[in-house]
């Protein structure tokens, strides 16, 4: 076996379409719009490269697609394994080592797997990748009424901009909408609520409603770090659920939360939210080699 970099987009797609992907990290990245997927792959061919293990007959046995999302940070799609072949941890280690050695130190490679659907533990142990956090996708299907702190919640007003912009920029970074993008999007189906107390903006929630699909998403919500564990986020969620189910023709409201604390996530059950899917995230930093 030997490791090579593949530059032929069609060859890569043919192998991926025929391969076994049960162990593939970030598999859902390839389930998006076909044009987006093509761009992912073409960008990866340019930087950092598509890495593959081939046998003596030049047949691809395993393939990794790392794509860049920030400076010195990559998300790894794969491994994709030749159909009918078992997962070889040794091949995976060798292939991943070639990938890491192609980059300078202080480069991080991130993995994401679906809990209860994928067996990822042996692979992550093999390359000594550490658990980072879990993305929980939660859904609610009914109104839970109003919050007792309803008087503290208001729709966004331009006078709140400075405090909102500062809190949003501090909380959400990579790939997030900017404060200006959120504010400029506000209309009948895009709502921004703020939690005000003692003249201070202590939290906010941004709701997007898709009536054509009969659902809504809590895109962003947070409370200021100085006022955590005071129920502000729960009050905002309660308000958003009540408003959305009362004013729109929707069946589901969903949101994503990133946490290492599953007990905290379980508290959202009190609002009628249940975990729909979990993505376990791992990180490998090349400087640790």
Image (cartoon, rainbow, N blue to C red):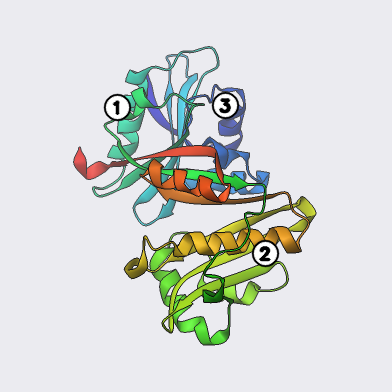
Quadrant (top left/top right/bottom left/bottom right) for the C terminus? top left
Q: How far apart are labels 3 and 2 at the CA level?
A: 48 Å
Comparing 179 with 167, the one in front is 167
Q: How far apart are labels 3 and 1 at the CA level?
A: 26 Å
The mark nearer the N terminus, 3 or 2, is: 3
Taking the spot 66% from the left edge, 48% from the top edge, the residue there is 35
Question: How far across and down, in percent of the image, does residue 233 sit?
Answer: 47, 62
Question: How far across and down, in percent of the image, does residue 128 sit?
Answer: 26, 32
Comparing 106 with 209, the one in front is 209
The mark nearer the N terminus, 3 or 1, is: 3
Q: How far apart are labels 1 and 2 at the CA level?
A: 46 Å
Q: Is residue 181 visible?
A: no
User: Could you tell me how many numbered marks the image carries?
Assistant: 3
Question: How far across and down, in percent of the image, does residue 99 sit?
Answer: 34, 36
Comparing 225 with 126, the one in front is 225
The residue tagged 3 is 15
Residue 31's image quarter?
A: top right
Question: How far across and down, in percent of the image, does residue 139 sit?
Answer: 60, 46
- Residue 28 drawn above or below residue 72: above
User: Label 2: how many residues lie within 10 Å, few (<14), some (14-19) or many (20+)?
Assistant: some
Of badges 1 and 2, nearer the viewer stands 2
Q: Is residue 95 left or right of residue 61?
A: left
The mark nearer the N terminus, 1 or 2, is: 1
Comparing 56 with 145, the one in front is 145
Tag 3–tag 2 contact (CB < 8 Å) = no
Assign a secondary structure to mark 1. helix
Assign a secondary structure to mark 3. helix
The residue tagged 2 is 243
Q: Which mark is residue 125?
A: 1
């Amino acid at each position: 076996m030997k490791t090579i970099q593949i530059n032929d987009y069609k060859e890569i797609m043919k192998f991926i379409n025929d391969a076994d992907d049960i162990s593939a990290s970030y598999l859902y990245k390839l389930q998006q719009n076909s044009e987006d997927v093509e761009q992912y792959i073409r960008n990866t061919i340019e930087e950092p490269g598509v890495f593959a293990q081939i046998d003596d007959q030049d047949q691809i046995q395993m393939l990794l697609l790392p794509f860049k999302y920030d400076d010195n940070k990559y998300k790894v799609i794969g491994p994709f394994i030749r159909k009918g072949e078992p997962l070889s941890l040794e091949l995976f280690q060798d292939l991943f080592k070639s990938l890491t050695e192609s980059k300078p130190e202080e480069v991080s490679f991130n993995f994401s797997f679906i809990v209860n659907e994928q067996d990822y533990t042996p692979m992550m142990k093999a390359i000594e990748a550490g658990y980072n956090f879990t993305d929980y996708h939660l859904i609610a299907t009914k109104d839970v009424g109003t919050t007792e702190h309803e008087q503290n919640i208001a729709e966004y007003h331009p006078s709140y901009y400075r405090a909102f912009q500062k809190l949003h920029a501090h909380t959400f970074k990579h790939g997030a909408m900017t404060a200006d993008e959120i504010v400029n999007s506000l209309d009948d189906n895009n709502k921004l609520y703020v939690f005000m107390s003692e003249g201070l903006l202590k939290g906010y929630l941004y709701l997007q409603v898709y009536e054509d699909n009969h659902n809504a998403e809590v895109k962003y919500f947070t409370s200021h770090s100085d006022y955590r564990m005071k129920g502000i986020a729960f009050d905002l969620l309660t308000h958003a659920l009540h408003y959305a189910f009362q004013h729109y023709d929707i069946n589901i409201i969903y949101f994503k939360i990133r946490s290492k604390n599953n007990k905290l996530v379980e508290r959202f059950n009190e609002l009628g939210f249940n975990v729909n899917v979990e993505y376990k995230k791992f990180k490998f930093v090349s400087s640790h080699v």
